[in-house]
Amino acid sequence: MADHAIPPHPCLTDLVIGAPAYTTCLYGDGKGAYVGATREDGSACAIAHVGRLVTIDGQRVLELTGYLTVPRRRDGEAHG
């Protein structure tokens, strides 16, 4: 038995699963659109995700695009 909670799937066959690194919460609008962010512990940067629930080869798939982000500057901070 594997030592992780990821169910087997063909899209993962070429990957070796390591230790958990972060958790992502995705929020749906009830119409098939989703948005969320992934933040790694100890890092100020994140990946913002946006996507839709689609059907690919008869399977429902959450198809996401990830955008690199940096923290928003606060008023009075130096611009580097």
Image (cartoon, rainbow, N blue to C red):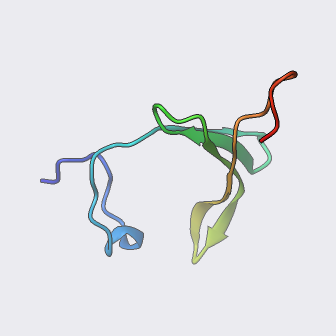
Q: Residue furthest top?
A: 76
Residue 55, percent across and down? 65, 68
Q: Residue at x 66, y 41 (%)?
A: 36
Residue 40, percent across and down? 49, 38
Give the quarter of the figure containing the C terminus.
top right
Q: Residue furthest right?
A: 75
Residue 33, percent across and down? 76, 50
As rendered, which of 59 and 28 lies closer to the eye? 28
Residue 60 location, quadrant? bottom right
Exactly how many numbered labels are in the figure?
0
Asked if residue 63 is positioned above or below residue 22 in the image, the reply reads below
Report whether 48 appears left or right of 39.
right
Report whether 49 appears left or right of 19.
right
Residue 64, percent across and down? 65, 58
As rendered, which of 50 and 54 lies closer to the eye? 50
Report whether 50 appears left or right of 44.
right
Residue 73 location, quadrant? top right
Asked if residue 28 is positioned above or below residue 33 in the image, the reply reads above
Q: Residue at x 31, y 73 (%)?
A: 13
Asked if residue 24 is positioned above or below residue 56 in the image, the reply reads above
Q: Residue at x 80, y 47 (%)?
A: 31
Report whether 8 appears left or right of 50.
left
As rendered, which of 19 and 28 lies closer to the eye? 19
